[in-house]
Image: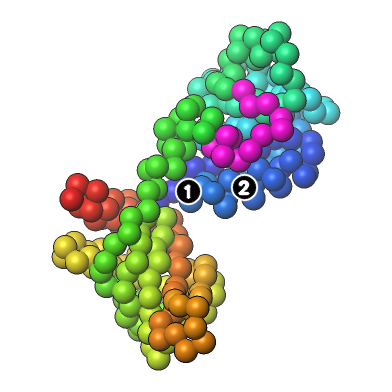
């Protein structure tokens, strides 16, 4: 499943890093790109399709307001959601941005939670509730290298899952790519999901714990597999 692309435009690298790290950590389906000013953003916007622009107001070469005005007059970009992220909180600045066509306004300093909420208000595709994680029981089969490991499913979302694997079973390495099959206790199943390991830890706080927790992040799914996984999750949410 293709990720939603977000362009972060700010002349301060620290702000761009804060937004990029916070969004990637807290939202499972975003791809964050960065631009240091409006001119750089123009080049990127004309070269690639984005789902949202997060833009500072005051920048060298081209301000956020100038980029907004340009985008709203661009035949291919005029509908793209645009959120102004700025320290300018005076009423006249807010009104000016709204009149220019901004979709929303975030005042610095801000939290990542608050930013994600604004993003969801602008476009439902950024609502993390679409990626709700379900506590589930079922079986997982992990295939990696020439090895196969079977485990118990603990939770599942559209973006990944957590499972228990017996410590005597083959255990994948961190960041190792996998092919995954999942079968729930209600007999709904999906197979051939590609992913990679993002976390490995003991299932219990004991040195002789019998099980190891393996967290898997799913990679972009082709349409057929994405539908199968959504159908599987729907079978749970409707119970």
User: x, y (%) of residue 91?
Assistant: 69, 10
Assess whether residue 214 is covered by the magenta stretch. Answer: no
User: x, y (%) of residue 42?
Assistant: 68, 31
Give the residue drawn at x 66%, y 43%. 19
Q: Is residue 12 left or right of residue 78?
A: right
**Which residue position holds label 1?**
29
Q: Earlier in the sequence, mark 2 or mark 1?
A: 2
User: x, y (%) of residue 139?
Assistant: 27, 72
Between 158 and 222, the one lying in front of the other is 158
State the extent of the magenta-drawn residues as a range: 105-116
User: Given contact means CB atoms under 8 Å apart, are the residues at marks 2 and 1 in contact?
Assistant: no
Single out the mark in the foreground, 2 or 1.
Answer: 2
Give the residue drawn at x 54%, y 30%. 118
Residue 76's place in the image compared with 194, above or below, is above
| Numbered tag placed on residue 22 in the rendering | 2
Between 147 and 150, the one lying in front of the other is 150
Q: Quadrant of residue 189?
A: bottom left
Residue 216's place in the image compared with 89, above or below, is below
- The local secondary structure at tag 2 comes to helix
- The local secondary structure at tag 1 comes to loop
Give the residue drawn at x 57%, y 34%. 114
């Amino acid at each position: 499943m293709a990720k939603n692309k977000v362009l972060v435009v700010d002349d301060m690298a620290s702000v761009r890093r804060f937004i990029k790290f916070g969004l990637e950590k807290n939202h499972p389906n975003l791809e964050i790109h960065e631009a240091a000013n409006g001119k750089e953003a123009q080049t990127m916007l004309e070269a690639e399709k984005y789902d949202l622009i997060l833009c500072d107001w005051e920048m060298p070469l081209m301000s956020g307001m100038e980029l907004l005005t340009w985008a709203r007059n661009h035949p291919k970009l005029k509908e793209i959601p645009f959120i102004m992220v700025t320290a300018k909180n005076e009423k006249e600045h807010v009104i000016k941005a709204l009149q220019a066509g901004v979709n929303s306004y975030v005042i610095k300093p801000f939290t990542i939670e608050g930013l994600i909420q604004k993003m969801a208000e602008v476009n439902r595709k950024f609502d993390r509730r679409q990626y709700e994680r379900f506590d589930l029981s079922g079986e997982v089969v992990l295939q990696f290298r020439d090895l196969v490991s079977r485990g118990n499913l603990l939770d599942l979302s559209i973006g990944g899952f957590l499972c228990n694997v017996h410590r005597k079973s083959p255990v994948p390495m961190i960041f190792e790519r996998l092919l995954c099959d999942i079968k729930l206790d209600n007999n709904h199943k999906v197979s051939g999901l590609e992913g990679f390991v993002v976390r490995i830890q003991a299932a219990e706080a004991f040195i002789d714990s019998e099980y190891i927790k393996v967290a898997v992040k799913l990679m972009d799914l082709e349409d057929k597999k994405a539908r199968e996984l959504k159908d599987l999750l729907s079978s749970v949410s409707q119970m």
